[in-house]
Image (cartoon, grey):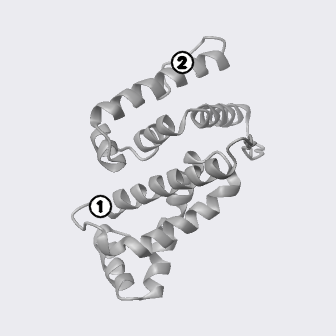
Amino acid sequence: MTESELQIYLDRICAGDTDAFEQVYQHTKQDVYRTIAFLVVDAQDIHDIMNEVYIQLLKSLHGYDRSKPFRFWLHGLVVRQAQDWKRKIWRRLRLLDRKKSLEVEVYAEHDEQVLRNETRREIVQAVQQLSAKLRVVVILRYYHNYSLEEIAQLLEIPLGTVKSRHHLALRQLRQTYAELFDGEVERHYVF
């Protein structure tokens, strides 16, 4: 769906068209799901946050600045809803440790593909071990390919803060990656 087609559906949503909302939902749900999955450690919360994102989309669509890409605006909603959700959970379960889970798909592939999948899983785990502030910068930068300036705008924080968090996140990932592979960090990975 192109940006102009999407704008037509957004106008229809504002007019109360539920079919248009369904089309936008179908077009964006995988991207929203994956982004939330990267931002939130507990897989049980993903669907609840997705619901909150789309409820917030309906509530705040009238305030969407049409001069910016819808995807950019939607990622802002996703990040804010994930942060709000974490605050709610933290308040309720301040002293309770939450278990982390990562489902691993079983593949019956050749050795090289299995090794790539295992490495990817370890990288995802390393990213998930970052603090929320660092993790969101890494996800927006490398998963969604936003520039540091766009991330600063999206998160509504100074560019220097984004650069600092980006640098710190990469340093922590390099350290974690080096520990995973006994100090042999290969240069062909992103970080």
Q: Residue at x 69, y 31 (%)?
A: 115
Q: Residue at x 60, y 37 (%)?
A: 128
Residue 46 position in % (x across, y down): 63, 57
The reply to whether discs 2 and 1 touch (Cβ–Cβ < 8 Å) is no
Q: Residue at x 40, y 88 (%)?
A: 16
For residue 122, which quarter of the picture? top right
Tell whether 36 sits left or right of 94: left
**Is residue 181 shown above or below 164?**
above
Q: Secondary structure at mark 2?
A: loop
The reply to whether residue 191 is in sight is no
For residue 112, which quarter of the picture? top right
Q: Residue at x 59, y 54 (%)?
A: 88
Residue 120 position in % (x across, y down): 62, 35
Q: Amino acid at mark 1?
A: Pro
* CA gap, disc 2 and disc 1: 36 Å
Q: Residue furthest left?
A: 67
Residue 1 position in % (x across, y down): 38, 70
Other-residue count near label 1 (Cα within 10 Å), few / some / many at <14 / 14–19 / ≥20: some
What number is the disc on residue 186? 2
What number is the disc on residue 69? 1
Chain-order first, disc 2 or disc 1? 1
